[in-house]
Amino acid sequence: MEVTPLRKAARRGLADEAADRVRDAIFAGHFRPGAPLREVELAASLEVSRGSVREGLAVLAREGLIRGGWHRPTTVVDVTAEDVDEVYSVRAALDRLAAITARTTATQVDLDELDALVADLATAVLENADGPRLLALDIAFHDRVYAAAGNGRLTEAWHAVRSQVFLFQLQRVSLGHEHYRARVVAEHRELAELIRAGDRDRLGRVAEEHVHTARESLLTELR
């Protein structure tokens, strides 16, 4: 039987490392929406080649975090009302499905981990942690819900928008920090309780409302 020739699998290298470092910097708020990302400066800072930086930026472009093109500067995406509506509408549908699926499939370990993340959020609020720290715990909670749902394709769909959700939520937190801090613990605690032992329909509504509240908060601040 003739064997179709395949390219050798690419090993994880400097391009992936560059993507991770730049993504982390964006999520930490070091590069704001609309901020330029210059290959030469990034290569010098990361101590890698411009080629590795270019490949790393291509990864972030596929995640929807940055934009650029031929003879156009590469920048972190701006957070526009249209983008917010699109991303949060998709997220609301995904989060609803993830939550109601996890209601059936979550293990005791999953449930305990969700409770632990809510406790970590509460501690972080009491300690007056900054926005990026709170948001990292927030996203970790939702990562766990998707993992508990056990649907690989659903998780892939979440990861397709996850980076944009993080960036948009970071903008929401920076523009309306107190509003976010006042709601983040109670909303996630309610989700955790409903996933553990709640009504399926109510859980679906609460999961969607959680996303819609975030969307409206951000749109209000953008206006």
Image (spheres, rainbow, N blue to C red):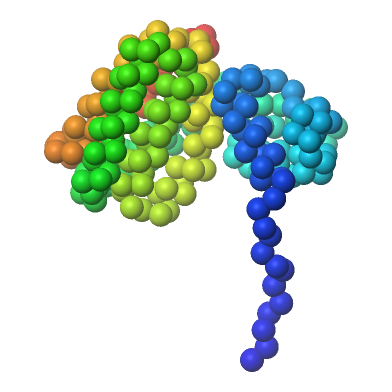
Q: In this view, does 42 lie to the left or right of 21?
A: right
Residue 122 higher or lower than 70, as above or below: above
Q: How many labels does the image show?
A: 0
> On the image, which quarter does residue 55 sit in?
top right
Picture quarter with the N terminus: bottom right
Percent across and percent down for residue 24 are 59, 31
Question: In this view of the protein, which residue sits in the foreground, 214 or 19?
Answer: 19
How far across and down, in percent of the image, does residue 25 sit?
Answer: 62, 27
**Residue drawn at 33 percent across, 52 percent down:** 150
Choose between 85 and 110: the one closer to the eye.
Answer: 110
Give x and y (percent) for residue 143. Answer: 40, 39
Q: Which of 1 and 50 is in front in this view?
A: 50
Residue at x 61% of width, y 33% of height: 23
The answer to whether residue 82 of the structure is visible from this angle is: no
Q: Which residue is drawn at 71% across and 77% down?
A: 5
Vertical comparison of 37 with 160: above or below: above
Q: Is residue 191 visible?
A: yes
Quadrant of residue 188 in the image?
top left
Q: Which of 123 and 36 is in front in this view?
A: 123
Please tell me which residue is depicted at 64% across the width and 20% down the height of the picture.
Answer: 30
| Residue 11 pos. (x, y %) | 67, 58
